[in-house]
Amino acid sequence: MKGNSNSIPEPKLGTINRFPLELVTNNITRVQIDVAGNIGIGTTTPTQMLDVNGRGLFRSMVVSNNATIPSVKQIITGGARDHTQSHPSLIAYGSGVGFYAEATGSGSTGILSIGGSDGVTGHGNNVGIAGFGKNGGVYAYGEKTGVLALGDESGVNASGKEGVVGKGRENGVHGYGKMIGVCGNGTDVGWGGYFVSEKGSGLYASTDKSDKNYAAVFNGNIIVSGLVNPSDGRLKKNIKSVGNAMDVIKMLKPRSYEFRADQNIFQLPSGIHYGFIAQDVEQVLPGFVKDIDVNAFGMQVQGATNNNYKSVNYIELIPILTKALQEQQAMIENQQRKINDLTTLVSDMLKRLQ
């Protein structure tokens, strides 16, 4: 081992003036400590207290006890879509939790990551990414995806004033899970999820099996300020006029009812309600009735032998009702013409009798 001319014969390894310390193997600098005390591994120009150029493997935990800064702060300079590609910025594996960060200081953040591709990527058999913070649980920004997480149970599971905040040019939050892709809980008077887009859609949900599964399931009341259904003629074929709508309407059986409390898996409201029984509608308009498999979205009825429940498409009743009103109006107008003709005839007959 050969040091520079400034080393002194003491039980120390280093320099006594402004010269960096280098650890060399095979005539290549592997580790360098600069004059400011920054340690570089794989780089001779470290900019942080620990600057690693290359992949690192921690077989235990990485702990930060400074509550005024994020537990891990990673500025991504060449992010990757997944861990199999080159130069990933942050990868975490674990049989329990892939990546865990907790920040307790005021205004602190559990995980803060900014990247050119994906801000934070986590893989775990239980939880992909878990973050807890008084301000933000997980905050990530990426040119493509803010948060990308895969887990056998939950993709992203976070709690805090804002559970998950993701900003991305393509996807703000992208989560995969065998049961839940993204899970958000609002325990106070806030929201479990809050989605805003300046130019696109705040929330986009889809399913590959629209005939069996559901793009979205809302277990409770919904407040909607606007609702738009695609109805462009260019999207349709086999267009036909609706006929005999009044006959169809006469066969429907409007009912009043209350929902059973012992089968209320859909969080259905209490009190008296008005509508139709799906089995009755199915006899008249079978295309308006669809089976709901509660197992498709992780719900089961205790003690029930069949988890299939029937639903009615009330929206498509509107054209039937419209046509029935038109048919009724045509009948009224026809009758009014007959009444007018009879009135004129009677008037003429009375004039002749005078």
Image: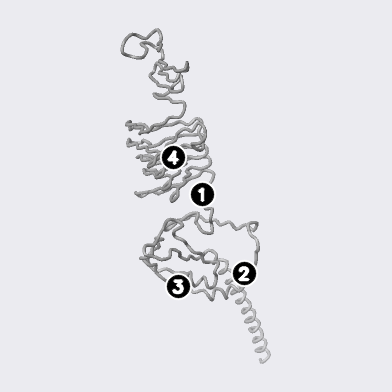
Which residue is rendered at x = 41% and y = 24% of the image? 48
| Quarter of the figure with residue 130 | top left
Mark 1 or mark 4: which comes first in sequence?
Answer: 4
Residue 33, quarter of picture: top left
Counting residues from the start of the chain, the first of labels 4 and 2 encountered is: 4
Local crowd size for mark 4, using a 10 Å CA cut-off: few (<14), some (14–19), many (≥20): many
Residue 304's x, y, as percent? 39, 65
Calculate the distance from the C-alpha at mark 1 to the C-alpha at mark 2.
Answer: 33 Å
Name the residue: 51% across, 66% down: 289
**Secondary structure of residue under mark 2:** loop
- Residue at the (48%, 45%) spot, across then down: 196
Q: If you read the primary sequence from the N terminus, does the residue marked by circle 1 or circle 2 appear first? A: 1
Left/right of residue 14 with respect to residue 88 in the rendered view: left
- Residue where numbered disc 3 is placed: 255
Residue under numbered circle 4: 122
Q: Secondary structure at mark 3?
A: strand
Q: Position of residue 179 (x, y in %)?
A: 43, 51
Residue type (three-letter) at the residue carrying disc 2? Val
> Helix or strand or loop: what does disc 4 sit on?
strand
The label nearer to you, 4 versus 3, is 4
Label 1, label 4: how far apart the Cα atoms are? 22 Å
Q: Residues within 10 Å of mark 3 (few under 14, many from 20)?
A: few
Whole-angstrom CA distance, mark 4 to mark 2, is: 53 Å
Q: Is residue 67 left or right of residue 285?
A: left
* Residue nearest the observer in this picture, 61 or 159: 61
Circle on res. 204: 1
For the rendered model, the colour scheme is: one colour
The answer to the question of whether label 1 and label 2 lie on touching residues, with beta carbons closer than 8 A, is: no
Q: Which residue is mark 2?
A: 242
Q: Residue 219's quadrant in the figure? A: bottom left
Of the two numbered discs 1 and 2 in the rendering, the one whose residue sits closer to the viewer: 1
Expressed as whole percent of the image width and height from the top left, the position of residue 65 reads: 32, 31
